[in-house]
Every structure is written in C-alpha cells, then in structure tokens.
Amino acid sequence: MDSVFIIKSLIILGIFAISLTIAAYETYFERVIAAFIQDRVGPDRAGPFGLLQPLADAGKLFFKEDFIPGMADKWLFILGPSLAMLTALMTSAVIPFGDSILYDGQEILVQGIEVNIGILWVFGVVSLGVYGILIGGWASNNKYSLYGAIRAASQNISYELAMGLSIIAVLMMASSLSLRTIVESQHGMNWNIFYQPLGFIIFLTCSFAECNRTPFDLPESENELVAGYHTEYGSMKLGLYLFSEYVNMFISSAVIATLFLGGFNYPGMDWVYATMTENFGAVVGHNLSTLAGTLVFFAKIFAFIFLFMWVRWTLPRFRYDQLMDLGWKGLIPLAIVNLIITAAAELSGHALLVNWIGLGVFIALVYAWSAIFGTKKTSL
Amino acid sequence: MQLTDRSKKTDKTPLTLAEKSYLPGIAKGLGITLKHFFSKKATIRYPEQKRYLGPIFRGHHILKRDEEGRERCTACGLCAVACPAEAISMVAAERVKGEESLYREEKYAASYEINMLRCIFCGLCEEACPKEAVYLRHDKFVPVFTSRDQVIYGKDQLVEDMNERYERDAWTKEEMQKLWAQQKPVNY
Ligand code: SF4
Ligand code: SF4
C-alpha cells in the first residue's frame, strides 16, 4: 500500500471521527449554552466541568430497553434512524476541510473526496435525510409520529427551494459546483458573504429549517406532537436520531462556512504561507499553513454551531402557517431577487459594487411599495 | 378590571416592513440572551458550593446543654406531644446522687429518640420545650440515610458536644435581617 493511500484513509477516518466527536460534544455544549443563557451553570457532574456527560448519555441510551411497538413495521422502524444517521455522516465527504498536504512529492487534498459536483452531492444526500425521518415516523404507526414526519417532509421540501436558489447565486459567482473551487474563489478576505448578504441570510434561515432546529423545529414540537417523529423511539435508536440532528448541525455549519465565509481562507493567509515556507521549507511550510487554514475553518464552524444554539435558546417556535408563509412567500421571492441581482452584478464586471447597489435599490423599492400600497393586514 | 399594573397591552398595530422581516426582533432577542450568557449565574454547583440558609433554617435537631455542660432536657414530654408527626419518643429517669453535673433537672431523659423519617422539620418541638433544650440547628442538615436502621437518632447523635457548642446566629428579626443583608451570596 502506498503512503498516499494511507494518508488519504487517515484523512477520511479523521473527518469521520471529528464529525462524531463534535456531534457528541455539541450535545454537551447545547446544554451548557442553554444553561448559561438561562442563568444556570449546566451539567457539571460527570467528569471535570461535566465533560464526560456525552459518554454518560450514550451509556444510558445503550442500556435502555430497545423497544419496538407491537403494531410498528419492524424493519422500517429500524431503518429510519439508521438512514438518518447514514445520510448525516455521508455529507461530510465532500467538504474541503483544508487546503492540501504535500507528502512524497504528491498533493493530497484535506477532503474526503473531491468531486466536481460537490454541492449537488450535499444537496442530494441532505434531501435523502428526510427519508430517515419520514420512514421512522411512518413505521411507528402513531399519528403524532406521522404528523411530525409529514411536517418534516413538507418543511424540508419548501425550504430546499429557497436554499437552492440562494446557492445558485453563489454558484454563478464561482462558476463551479465543486466546493473546493468555491472555496478557492474566496481567497483571503474575498468572502461570498460580502457579495451575498441577502443570500447568506436566506441560506442560514433555510439551514435552520433543514436541520429542524428552533425556530423551525416543528417536526418535533413537543407541545403539539409529544415528540414528533421520534415519539415511539427509545434507547440507541432515539440516540441515533438525536445524534444525526447534531451531525447535521455540524455539517450545515461547515457548508455555510464553505459557501459564504470562505472555508479555510482567512485574511493574511498569503503572508502566513510565505513566512511558513520561508522558515520551514516548501513542504513543511505548506503543510503547516494547511493546518492553520483547517483550524480557521473549524473556528468558523464552531462559531456557526454556537449561533445555532444561541438562536435555539432565543427564539420561540414558528406556527406552521407562519413557517410555510415565510418559506414560500418570503424566502423564495427574496432568493429569486437575489439571483437576479447577482446575475446583473456578474455581468457588469463590478460584482461587489453592483450587488450592494442592487440590494439597496431593491430595499428602497420594497419600502416605497409598502409606503404607497401599505395594507393593514398582519399576515406574517 | 385591571388586576395588576404589570400587564402589558397587546400591540395589534400592523407590522412595519422591518418588523415583517423579523431581523431587528431577532437581533434584539439575541442581544438579550447574549447578555444573560455572560451574566452572573443564579444557581451554584451545589454539593461543593453552599449557600447560607439563614439563621432560622430548621435542620438537624440538637439537645442543648447548659453553661456547665448539664443536659437541659427534663423529659417532660411536651415536645413529643407537640410533634405533629409523632417522631419523638423518650424514656424518663430520676437523677440519682452524684449525677448533678450531668443533668440539670431532677428528672432527665434516659433515652431520647427522634425518628428522622417521620420528622417534618416543623420546629414545633423547639417551640414547645419549656427548658430550652431542643433546637433545630440552622447550620447542619440531617444527613442522607440509605437504610432504615440509620433513621432513629438517639441521644448519642442529638446531645450537644461541649467542644463544638451550637450558637444560633440571630434571635431577633432585626438581627436576622442584618445577617441576610451581609451574607446574601447571590443577587437574584
Ligand atoms: S421538628 Fe416537628 S416533626 Fe420534627 S421532631 Fe420536632 S415537632 Fe416533630
Ligand atoms: S426536650 Fe424540652 S419539651 Fe422535650 S422532653 Fe425535654 S424538656 Fe421536655
């Protein structure tokens, strides 16, 4: 076996392990952040600062009775959480976690697989993820589970549209579907968020909805649906559902950071690269600056994970009709407008300037419209 | 009819455009939660950190001795009668010659038992006692017990240790309020 293959396998294993570890610790930090926001101290019993809490939780879940309801469809009932977990873990394959490692005269990308349709892969797999929820909810043979599952499905379909439209704007700027090319086009501080503030907000909102996180956690709204699609689940099957939600959160943070915040790019990276290669030689310097980029990328991911949790403990849940209104009447038209502005900006040759002018003109128009034709209704 | 002056009138005016986008509201809410994220916590890490419970907290019972170290209890049984949970039982005995340094009164409790599973820590025994013998400490809990043979506290656990005398911090309301003002560990 050649060493390139080994390094590649190590990278893949590392990505896998990191997604699982981060997901496990997300459960811990979710509680700590919830506690801090509510003026409490949070879990602190298991290990120093409660750091072993995820282990304790996992242990507890494993020792619970693995129960399958009598009228449930047994195989689908098992398939549901497995599918949710599988799809959650598959997405991380195409995300470029760092630049590349030089080893043995070869360049190895810090990425599971580099495919030229990376973003499509993410989208395809994420859409599959809803099957896990749908199958689980249906197989439970419980009306609350089914409601939750159907809500999840309709919500995901509605928000995927706006999400896709807001991504197309990004794709137009990079003129590529490959996540790596998108990242490389945002070299240094040239991040997409500065070109696409509206697209960023739309994408962020949609990813909250896709992850079934508050304020869009209708599929598991406990005051209406007991626990939604996982009402009948217990033991590690429930664990897999909850865990896949946290993996999804990690992945969507990574995707947001990749698409809009420049992935592993950071201001001053050229200078870091130059100093590193000067001081440590071309190969080691390159690898070190890759490491720095990866660390920056993870910092961005953690910032977004914090945002996810922060929002969860701030905002109340949307009503179902509000959710659909926001998705279909709010975000999709906005995404289309964003698309048009971006297209014009790309054609004009001054992307940054025209994007902001377009946005300003659009907001002014909407304001004028609402001032002239302002209705008395308070639908949203 | 207005019941309180805290109620807020629901604002039913139509949302403005900025409000309809939710963004200002969300930013405001995030600001509030972030403020709380960094603010001082209202709870403590309990078994390691403890709060001052106040001078009138009703905890572990104690049978006081007087200044010369004699047991004050005269086994009158008033505490047992006052006890709503019927947790106290005692056996009285007569003081014989030579025991004057042990018992203050001529009659004393040869055995005095409180069943801590029955006790509801109401403090009525303390109020009933004419000899100022039984008190509920403000500074000590009855420890957690794990089996039934640990729940009956006899004289060996109840009678005051002369080396570690129990003093109540405050007796009057004014003293107590002063203490609270000093010792309050966390601002709610
Ligand atoms: S505190 Fe109340 S319940 Fe407990 S022994 Fe005294 S009188 Fe009885
Ligand atoms: S503790 Fe007080 S009330 Fe109870 S028997 Fe002794 S003297 Fe009487």
Image (tube, grey):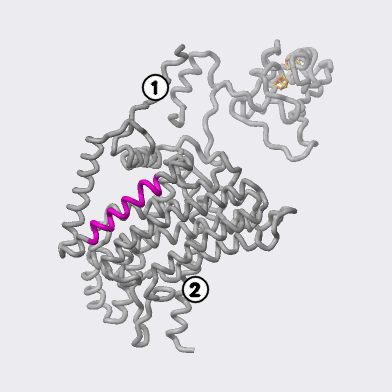
Q: Which mark is residue A13?
A: 2
Circle 2: element type: helix
For image coordinates 47% across by 54% down, the residue present is A156
Up-down relation of residue B30 to residue A184 (above or below): above
Residue A244, compared with residue A373, is above or below; it is below
Residue A19 shows up from this direction: yes
Gap between marks 1 and 2 measured at Cα:
58 Å
The label shown at residue A191 is none
**Does B99 sit above or below residue A250?**
above
The answer to whether A31 appears left or right of A289 in the picture is right
> Residue A266 appears at what percent x and percent y?
27, 64
Is there any visible trace of residue A303 in the rendered image?
no
Which quarter of the figure has residue A298? bottom left
What residue is shown at x 25% (from left), y 35% (from top)?
Answer: A373
Q: Is residue A336 magenta?
A: yes
Quarter of the picture containing the C terminus of chain B is: top left
Residue indicated by mark 1? B9
Residues at discs 1 and 2 both on one chain:
no
Residue A270 spot, x, y in % from top left: 22, 70
Magenta stretch in the rendered image:
A326-343
